[in-house]
Amino acid sequence: MPTSLIDSAEIRTRRILIVDDEHANVLLLASVLEREGYRDIHTVTNPAEALESYIRLEPDLVLLDLMMPEVDGFQLLEAFKRHDRPDEFRPVLVLTADSTINARRRALALGAKDFVSKPFDVIEVALRISNLLETRILYQRLQQG
Amino acid sequence: MSEVRPHRPLTRFWADRPLALKGLVVVALPLAILLGALVSLYVASNAEVRAEDDVRRAVAIQRDTYQAHALLAEAAAGVRGYALTGQDRFLEPYRKAEAYLPQTFARLDQAIRDPEVRGHFNRISELAVRKREGLRRIVELAGDPAARRGEPSAIEEALVSNKIVLDAMRLEIELIQRRESVLLDQRRALVEEVRDRYLLLTAISALVGLLGSLAAVYLFSTGIVRRVKMLEANAELLARGDELTNLPEDADEIGTLAQRLARASALLRGREQALRESEERFRLVIEEVRDYGIFALDPDGTVTSWNLGAQRIKGWEAEEILGHHFSRFYPEETREFLPAQMLERAREAGTAEDEGWRLRKDGARFWANVVITALHDDQGNLRGFAKVTRDMTERRRSEEALRVAREEAIAANLAKSEFLSRTSHELRTPMSAILGFGQLLELDEDQLEPRHREALSQIMKAGRHLLSLINDLLDISSIEAGGAELAIERLDLGELLQEVHALAGPIVAAAGLRFALEAPDEPLVAWADRRRVVQIMLNLVSNAAKYNRTGNLVRLSCTARGRDIRVEVEDDGAGVAAADVPRLFTPFDRLGQQNRARVDGTGLGLALSKRLVESMGGQIGYEAPEQGARFWFTLPVRQRARAPRGAPAKSE
């Protein structure tokens, strides 16, 4: 484990929302997270329900697939951004099979905090997730004073 | 013939002389003849003067002989008188004779030329001497009174002998006179003859001079005036545009003028011919043109002429349409405004062009290209319009077909790329699950049965292979769809080579080969996408490592070649069979299918490398060294205008 300001146990208590229309991918990410010790994991395979879940669950981190039918990841990114307060740091990690620079740029421009292309390295994804959560916790602490 | 020949060059020679020389000859010839006549006159008059001198001399001789005779006779008579009377006054003639006779004889001696006369003269001179002697004696005797009285017989005797001498002298003088008169007659005749000859010569000279002048003038006039007349006649022909005939051919000014005239005529006739032909062609073109409807309108738009093309395109015969307004060529929707608009535009701008639907006689539509040109007279008044109509229906149709075909082709290509791209995405998504779960299992490997571990290893191996295949396919499809994402930047290839050498070191080492690097110390700058160049180098190096089963070396090198940097990857293995070389860069055409079981690879690496190199403005190729295989590619030293730095490509 890398040295960290935040207790890794605290990180693992955080709530994570996984949005992907592919059931297998949702299951894979959930498995990775469970293996890492995360317990508060929520999944959505129907993108139409994603925003509702986001609002209801107020997750600490979202794992979002870009290429989905009907409502794609870009639209959801915009919707999340509209919903959040401007000073809120709620990281979205985009995971997509579309590895073009354009997709990357667009996602990051819309507020995604990180970008991983599929297929991904399991360990790398786990590290990025814990990093993002750590940043969120630090941010929250700063805000609380 | 043989007589004409020597004659002809002479006339030719004369005709070819310049006019100035001819004029000189014409003026000089009679003058020369006149000069000749003058010389002959001078000679003749000299002869006459000589003859007249002779006559004068003859007369002088006659006169002097008479004088001598007279002096002597008078002297004798005087002496006789003195002898008889003794009176001194009778001696006067004697003294006169004594004074004058020597002069007279001296003159005669000078004047006499004729030998016969000279003989007489000599005798006379002798006699004269004797006579004067005799007279002197008588005078002496008569002067002595003693002798006069004593011897009168001596005086008588002297007188008698004197008389005899005088008679002999008279005889001689008569002979001279006779001779001289004969000579005088001869000389007079000679003078007459010379005078006649002189007259004849003068007459002949005058005649010859006259004839000479006439001949020269004739020559001049025939040579020049005749030929000038020929020229004049030909100038007349030239003015009429007829062919020239009978031109003087000589080399003088007139001949030259004739040649100029002939040349001018040829030129004029050539031009006239060309003009006639061009006019004829133009008329034929207008009348017979079938692809263009060419016709004229009056200022109001009424049709005033009609050609074959118009008839063919629009369907009306000339007699059916002449006198009608041209708006009937327009379909209903434009008939109200477009014809008037077109004429207005042509009036203002000089010409108006339009492309659109027009009507045929049978009501069918055709797509026409129309040009209307305003026609003005010299004063600038509008006289009407020329209208050229072209049936573009076919072209429009083929253009349309071409456009559709092109769009279809583009769409098909896009669809293909889109399909490939989507397919790759679709394939990568499940790969994500396969490889992800596999990796999860690998992380907990120690919990697996050994046979499961082996199975997992195979799944991961096949999965990774499949993924690299899909990635290559995605790359190729995005390049072919024009969406290659290139981040062109300034690269030091030497440095990049070092990097690749380090990166690929383990692969080469795993194949049991030595990995040689040859890069110059100075930087080798090229413009390319760093990530892609590394990808290409890695592909070539791993190929070399994979396929080199028999050698022991992989060599990576880099050199500057003019406007390119050339990178080479060489090995000392079995090389590529000559027959397989043309297929090296074709997708999925992996060589040596028999090796497939032993060699990992997608079969897309070289095809992808080729597309990447070319999209960066370079070239890629293969050449066979003595041993092994050598792949090379080039990258441009200069930045290409089409792929500017920092503006990497469109991507969708």
Image (spheres, rainbow, N blue to C red):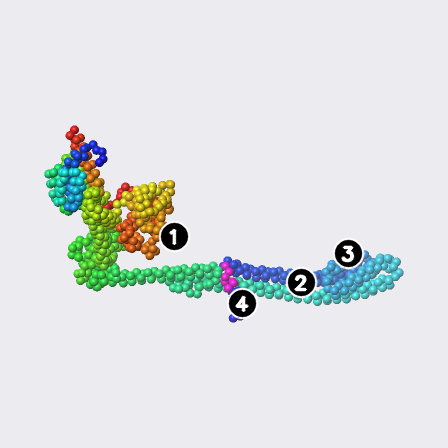
Q: Quick check: marks 3 and 2 in contact, CB under 8 Å?
A: no
**Dot 1: few (<14), some (14–19), or many (≥20) neighbours within 10 Å?**
few
**Dot 4: few (<14), some (14–19), or many (≥20) neighbours within 10 Å?**
few
Is residue B263 visible in the rendered image? The answer is yes
Judging by the rendered image, the residue that carries numbered circle 3 is B99
Judging by the rendered image, the residue that carries numbered circle 4 is B6
Mark 4 to mark 1 CA distance (whole Å): 90 Å
Is B217 in the magenta? no
Classify residue B364 as left or right of residue B90. left
| Mark 2 element type | helix
Q: Quick check: marks 1 and 3 in contact, CB under 8 Å?
A: no
Q: Main secondary structure of the magenta part?
A: helix
For disc 2, the chain is: B
Is B15 in the magenta? yes
- Who is closer to the viewer here, B522 or B623? B623
Region of the chain picked out in magenta, as a range: B12-18
| Residue B261 pos. (x, y %) | 42, 60
Classify residue B417 as left or right of residue B280. left
Q: Earlier in the sequence, mark 3 or mark 2?
A: 2
User: Which residue type does callout 2 highlight?
Assistant: Ala
Judging by the rendered image, the residue that carries numbered circle 1 is B626
Judging by the rendered image, the residue that carries numbered circle 2 is B51
Residue at image point 77% right, 58% down: B102
